[in-house]
Image: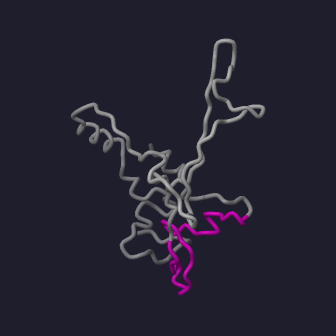
Amino acid sequence: MTKTDRWTIRPEGSNWGDFGADDELGMLNIITDEMRLAAMREVKEGKAFPLSLPLDYPGGESEDAVRFGPKLFATKLQGKAVFNHNVSPVDVCCDDGVTMCLQYSTQWDSFAHWGRMYDVDGSGELKPTYYNGWRAGIDTLGADQVGGPKCLKLGIEKMAMTG
């Protein structure tokens, strides 16, 4: 365990500090190239299967829903849908998009998705805190803060870069 300037007491059973004071990946750190190769050696058949749910699952929305179903749309160019659009004399294009809550049908989350009110510095004061002591309002900026909303630490791109 490594004590940092962000926290002096880590939650019981947590791995805060085990991968360094500035870690943003947690147990993803143990997924090495060697581990991926070992996992590939377990493959017996070349079958493909989806790792995600359909975008419209589970379907429906309640009136007080925080998350809403995906909104599918065609992109527009000069006010017209880019669908069967002539891009050049020999090329046509259909370009569409989707706006969705990342927890509606799948789970695309970073460690900044869920935190706790925690006495991170032993002061007796509970403060909104995420994995490894990264702090709400400092390391994750809310919509009402300059530059927010944005994760300065624990963003999903950190996980994506691990492969």
Given residues 162 and 83, the one toward you in this image is 83
Q: Residue at x 49, y 77 (%)?
A: 8
* Quadrant of image for the C terminus: top left
**Where 54 sits versus 126, above or below?**
above
Examine the residues drawn in magenta and state their main secondary structure.
Answer: loop
* Position of residue 22 measured from the top left corner of the image (x, y, whole percent): 52, 61
User: Is 79 situated left or right of 159 in this image?
Assistant: right
Q: Residue at x 67, y 30 (%)?
A: 82
- List the single residue furthest toward the top: 89
Quarter holding residue 150: bottom right
Residue stretch rendered in magenta on the structure: 116-145
User: Is 151 situated left or right of 59 in this image?
Assistant: right
**In this figure, what is the number of numbered marks?**
0
Q: Residue at x 28, y 31 (%)?
A: 46
**Where 65 sits versus 33, above or below?**
below
* Position of residue 35 measured from the top left corner of the image (x, y, whole percent): 31, 44
Q: Residue at x 76, y 34 (%)?
A: 79
Residue 76 falls inside the magenta stretch: no
* Position of residue 56 measured from the top left corner of the image (x, y, whole percent): 48, 48
* Quadrant of image for the N terminus: bottom left
Residue 135 falls inside the magenta stretch: yes
